[in-house]
Image (cartoon, rainbow, N blue to C red):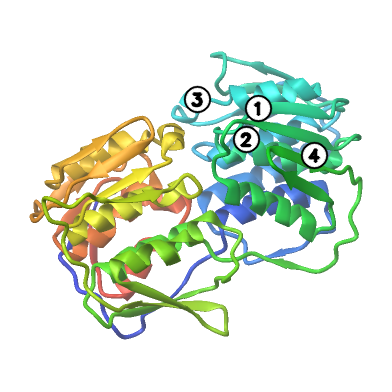
Amino acid sequence: MNIKIQNSKFKIENSTIKITGSKSETNRLLLLQALYPNITVENTSNSDDSDVMQQALQNFNQWTTDNRQPTTDNLIDVHHAGTAMRFLTAYFAIQENREVILTGSSRMKERPIAVLVDALRQLGADITYKENNGFPPLHIKGKKLPNKKVSLPANVSSQYISALLLIAPKLENGLKLTLEGKITSIPYIKMTLALLNEIGITTTFVSNQIGVNPQPTTDNRQPITIESDWSSASYYFSIVAMSEIGTQITLSTFKENSLQGDSALVEIYKNFGVETVFNKNHSITLTKSCNVQPTTDNQQPTTYDLNNSPDIAQTIAVTCFGLGIGCHLTGLHTLKIKETNRLEALQNELTKLGAKITITDDSLTLDASTKIVENVTIKTYQDHRMAMAFAPLALKTSLVIEDAEVVSKSYPTFWDDLKSIGFSCKPI
């Protein structure tokens, strides 16, 4: 399904959006809940990724309940859900005497997982590749992992690291993890450790050394409420930035001391004229406080280091293009292994709109533009963030979003929510 978005204007009335729980927190807690069934969780994400994660765990547990014999006929398909692929690889590796094939979509089979598999093998895991070395699908034979120490490159996706940390308290000797080099996405590692701490597990994180103590059971009885998703909120930051002075929108539910790296939006979008107020009811109100002056030819574009928050790179690049300002985004080396190569995808689609943009393996540079080509069809490359990041440009021009249903991966109600604030979105 393609969606045509006519050049729209933000509707001031009813400008309150309820955003579902963070996908990142939800998937971590779903795994912890599988390890410690007494944990209760509230405000879980309604994303496809979290649904896939939950369904995979339920199917696996049902096999155990039915006393199904260990066999490679036990197939788990996570489709496009990269978080589920990484977290479940670690989870299934410690399920003693259980056997499973973990697979995914054609794109998932192109996304590397050797770093995680190698680390789990260091701990004693029995994992083999079914097709191509270093890539899913995986044949996992669950067993007790006797080893404690493991090391891996620090500049890999934080999901590999979090996958190890989440199963660590169930290892008989705990875990001592050494990260080699500069660490990527530290906030997401700290998120995982904070959630472990919240259920009573002792952890340490000093320099490049992370420790997790073993803990067979937990006494945690308090429900854990998941914060709303800052990545999903980013599209409203973009909308407010491209709107008139005085425009406001309220989003719920967010914490001022958030665990999510994408909360960096609050500081970054001040540069685009957006002020954020944290309200007593845990909502946030975004206000367009001033206009941003377009970048002149002799100005160097502002640099934003997104090493800790790469998922908002698409939103920021599109916002800057819509505002007619340049930007230089760094710390983007993990974007090549997402749902698509997001650096190439951004370059392709922004260029169609009239942008001048260059990319390297880990950066993106956008020159200031004064014109936007109308009625361009934006290809999404099966990537939910491509669809949502480009949608706010409808405040500047009409455009078509191809395969618009991909938003269900993280934000199923996105198009309805856009309509509620005045966007003209019609399937074509």
Q: CA distance from mark 1 to mark 2?
A: 9 Å
Residue under label 3: 109
Q: Position of residue 223 (x, y in %)?
A: 76, 68
Q: Is residue 60 left or right of residue 46?
A: right
Between disc 3 and disc 2, the foreground one is 2
The residue wearing badge 4 is 168
Q: Secondary structure at mark 1?
A: strand
Query: Which residue does the numbered mark 1 point to in the structure image?
Result: 152
Write down the quadrant of residue 11 in the picture. Answer: bottom left
Residue 408 visible, this angle? yes
Q: Earlier in the sequence, mark 3 or mark 1?
A: 3
Q: Nearer the viewer, residue 253 or 307?
A: 307
Find the distance from the CA under tag 3 to the CA under tag 2.
Answer: 16 Å
Disc 2 designates what residue? 160
Foreground label between 4 and 3? 4
Q: CA distance from mark 3 to mark 1?
A: 22 Å
Q: Residue at x 86, y 29 (%)?
A: 96
Look at 34% across and 45% down and name the residue there: 329
Looking at the rendered image, the disc whose residue lies closer to the viewer, 1 or 2, is 1
| N-term-proximal mark, 4 vs 3 | 3
Choose the circle earlier in sequence order: 4 or 1: 1
Q: CA distance from mark 4 to mark 2?
A: 13 Å
Q: Kindly identify the amino acid type of the residue bearing the numbered disc 2.
A: Tyr
For discs 4 and 1, the disc positioned in front in the rendered view: 1
Tell me whether circle 3 and circle 1 mark residues in contact (CB < 8 Å): no
Where's residue 213, x and y in %?
Answer: 86, 44
Q: Tell me whether the residue at label 1 lies in contact with that at label 2, contact meaning CB atoms closer than 8 angstroms.
A: yes
